[in-house]
Amino acid sequence: MKFDAPVEGILLEVLCQKLQPMSRTRVRKLVKNGSVSVDGEVVLRGDLKVRPGQTIDTEQNLRAKRDGSPFPVLYEDRDVIVVNKPAGLLSIATRTERSKTLYKSLNHFVQDQSKGRERVFIVHRLDREVSGIMIFAKTPEVQETLQRAWAGTEKRYVAMVEGRPPLEEGTIENWLRETRAHKVFSCPRSPEAKLAITHYRELKVFPRHTLLEVLLETGRKHQIRVHLAEMGCPIVGDRRYGARRSPIHRFGLCAYSLSFDHPFSGDRISLEIPIPKVMRSFRGRN
């Protein structure tokens, strides 16, 4: 998100006002992680004074962005690369689409930049319609390490849904199975079913819709989509699971926060992107 400072003030206060309903703590993390620039210069202190008309940019981690990257690079070192996936793009190839994928584009970029010495390996996936943070390994060993430790990775999403949940915050826990048509549904416990746990809380309530923060405790296929739909609150734009339409003209789900232990240093890496503008600025008129 790029905007001009409307008044003179402290950067953190200006950001908190502009990025509502993002919490103050998460706005502070954006600054600390190098995801904010003022007039093109990355700033790491929220107490910086800004003047009216100065340009503030929060689109991606500007310190990590590399020239020519097909997607915003949020973090990169010798072992991993983390990018912001756009909505509408496959994570990896399918039987019907093998060329237009995030994996293929990013792999070509990394190979070109490293003159063939590096490539990327899939650690996890996001559905085609979902935008947000994805991590890739640069070696099979790193891929295996990250996948073994995936249960300890914190994955947070924002979801715009139809209706309103019965509680302001809660936990959905049940068992999920997939049909031969690749549709997922809840079911009694069985050898074929997988345990799925989703936590949610309301961020903002509108007359016909609700903006939620969703925290995954498990990471099953279509888990968020199924759990919210079966609660009576399908994600806007998700016709597969019962949504009627999308007032924001996109699929209402974004993986906006990811925290993981670095596979070698053990340091906790926490990354966050701004909530998509169409969700942040929605006023509930549709």
Image (tube, rainbow, N blue to C red):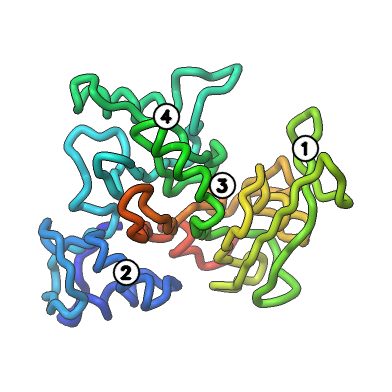
Q: Quadrant of the C terminus?
A: bottom right
The residue identified by callout 1 is 178
Marked residue nearer the N-terminal end (2 or 1): 2
- Mark found first going from the N terminus, 1 or 3: 1
- The one nearer the camera, 105 or 75, is 75
The alpha-carbon separation of the residues under discs 1 and 4 comes to: 25 Å
- Going from N to C along the chain, the mark reached first, 2 or 3, is 2
> Which numbered disc covers residue 103?
4
Other-residue count near label 1 (Cα within 10 Å), few / some / many at <14 / 14–19 / ≥20: some
The residue singled out by tag 2 in the image is 29
Image coords of residue 175 (percent x, y): 79, 52
Name the element at disc 1. strand
Residue drawn at point x = 86 percent, y = 51 percent: 189
Front tag of 1 and 3: 1
Q: Contact (CB < 8 A) between labels 4 and 3? A: no
Determine whether, in the image, residue 279 is placed left or right of residue 175: left
- Kindly report the distance in space between the C-alpha atoms of the residues bearing marks 2 and 3: 26 Å
Query: On the rendered structure, is 224 left or right of 48?
Result: right
* Three-letter code for the amino acid on which mark 3 is drawn: Phe
x 27%, y 80%: residue = 13
Which secondary structure, mark 3?
loop
Neighbor class of circle 4 (other Cα within 10 Å; few <14, some 14-19, many 20+) is: many
Where is residue 250 shown, x and y percent of the image? 53, 46
Q: Secondary structure at mark 4?
A: helix
Q: Residues within 10 Å of mark 2 (few under 14, many from 20)?
A: some
Foreground: disc 2 or disc 3: 2
> Could you tell me the amino acid type at mark 1?
Glu
Q: CA distance from mark 1 to mark 3?
A: 21 Å
**Residues marked 1 and 4 touching at CB (< 8 Å):** no
Which of 160 and 102 lies nearest the eye of the viewer?
102
Q: Which mark is residue 251?
A: 3
* Residue type at the position of mark 4: Tyr
